[in-house]
Amino acid sequence: MIRVLIADDHAIFHRGLREILVRALKDVICGAAENAHQVLTQVQTQNWDLVILDITMPGRSGLDVLDDLVRVKPKLPVLVLSMHPEDHYGMRVLKAGAAGYVMKGSTPEELIKAIHKVLGGGRYVTPALAEKLAVNLRGHTKGAAHEALSRREFEIFRMIGSGKTIGQIAAELHLSITTVSTYRARILEKMNIATNADIIRYALHNHLVD
């Protein structure tokens, strides 16, 4: 019996994913969680073999949830399934402890391949992401400016890059305006830029926002 917890706030997507898993895996049981609180509650009160985690959820982000999961259940594999291109988050979630990263636009066959890989104790990455990780580990490239940002800084960077105000970001992330402003200042300093307009131009040029 394989027990899979699907952490995603879209009911239609959850239903479709469950059907894929039931068809492809033998004796699978799927649970559902729509937000960070539900994910952590179910992980701490029930036994799961795998968590399939979306990055974008209401309230605390999937990246925050990943940090908590790695802390409270370090042996529980987490497969991140996201609509964001792997260039945006792939390296970050793997470094944070995820067992794999798959885009929602991938084929069902690739998803099942990833699930088998992580359930077997391995880590799943696409060939393109594997090459990027190898180059990063060898230190052959300096890396883009945004890669120097922390996980939270990068999250706020993308929100500014998509045109959101400091107030909107604070409300969405449940942070104070002062805290978000401090993150913004760090982003500007690390990336050696001066304004929100610079962030927006950089994000658009590097395809870091939708």
Image (cartoon, rainbow, N blue to C red):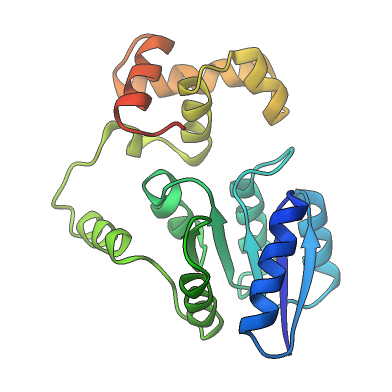
Q: Quadrant of residue 33?
A: bottom right
Locate the N terminus and report the quarter of the image it occupies. bottom right
From where the camera sits, is residue 92 visible?
Answer: yes
In front of the other: 6 or 91: 6
Point out residue 169 in the picture as x, y percentages from the top left corner: 63, 22
Above or below, 195 relative to 37: above
Using the rendered view, name the quadrant where residue 39 is placed. bottom right
Residue 197 in the image: state x and y as whole percent.
39, 10
Quadrant hosting residue 142: top left
Side of 176 relative to 103 (left or right): right
Q: Is residue 25 left or right of residue 87?
A: right
Name the residue rendered at 44%, 31% in the picture: 209
Q: Is residue 89 left or right of residue 53?
A: left
- Please state the horizontal and vertical placement of residue 136, each as a whole percent of the image: 24, 54
Which residue is nearer to you in this view: 56 or 73?
Answer: 56
Q: Residue at x 48, y 66 (%)?
A: 107
Instruction: Choose between 61 and 73: the one closer to the eye.
Output: 61
The number of callouts visible is 0
- Please state the horizontal and vertical placement of residue 171, each as a whole percent of the image: 72, 22
- Residue 49 in view: no
Measuring 74% from the left and 49% from the top, which residue is drawn there? 9
